[in-house]
Amino acid sequence: MTEGSLERYDAVLTTPELVLLEMEADSKEDAAAQLAERMFQAGRISDLAGFLAQVNAHEHQLATGLPGGIGMPHARSEFVTKTSIAVGVTRHGYSLDFGAVDGRATVVLLIATPASSFSEHLEVLATLARSLFKENFRESLRRAHDAEVIAELINSTLVFFDH
């Protein structure tokens, strides 16, 4: 059976195992490493170091901070086996500099898409960004304190994958 677009879109983009609550990170690179480790453990990326090198290289070229305390590091990579989003919500008092003009991030979404899926990568980024610009959505992520609720919030915002 070939990997058709419908099968690809049926994939759940995040799971409770890809959500890290009470994250303590020293830097945006450390945050990305902690989240990528979750993806690696879940079998969603095949080479942890290779993927992180690509995420960090992209981050050095272009800041990925969004208004409202969001960091959204991302990479299209040959090391990604399944489009995935890992979510980190920082422990109270922790925040990370992702280069947003309005300050530091307390919610980090690491987005990983296969190298071949350029349009899917852009669609995921754009759709998530639209949701993240809504204050109530950002606050829901911050206040959830439950990995299943956070995973459901992220997956439900990406319902376009059902087409």
Image (spheres, grey):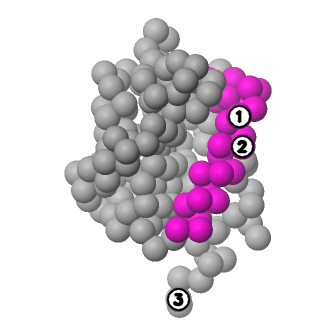
Q: Nearer the viewer, mark 2 or mark 3?
A: 2
The residues bearing labels 2 and 1 have C-alpha atoms spaced at a distance of: 5 Å
Label drawn at residue 2: 3
Q: Is residue 74 magenta?
A: no
Label drawn at residue 130: 2
Q: Residue at x 44, y 66 (%)?
A: 114
Q: Nearer the viewer, mark 3 or mark 1?
A: 1
The residues bearing labels 3 and 1 have C-alpha atoms spaced at a distance of: 36 Å
Is label 2 in a helix, a strand or a loop? helix
Amino acid type assigned to the residue bearing label 3 in the image: Thr
The residue pinned by badge 1 equals 133
Q: Earlier in the sequence, mark 3 or mark 1?
A: 3
Q: Nearer the viewer, residue 81 or 53?
A: 53
Q: Which residues are magenta?
A: 118-142
Amino acid type assigned to the residue bearing label 2 in the image: Arg
In this rendering, does residue 118 appear at all?
A: yes
In the rendered image of this protein, does residue 105 appear above or below residue 46? above
Q: Residue at x 32, y 53 (%)?
A: 54
**Residues at circles 2 and 1 in contact by the CB criterion of under 8 Å:** yes
Amino acid type assigned to the residue bearing label 1 in the image: Phe
In this rendering, does residue 22 appear at all?
A: no
Is label 3 in a helix, a strand or a loop? loop
Split into 4 quadrants, where in the image is the C terminus? Answer: bottom right
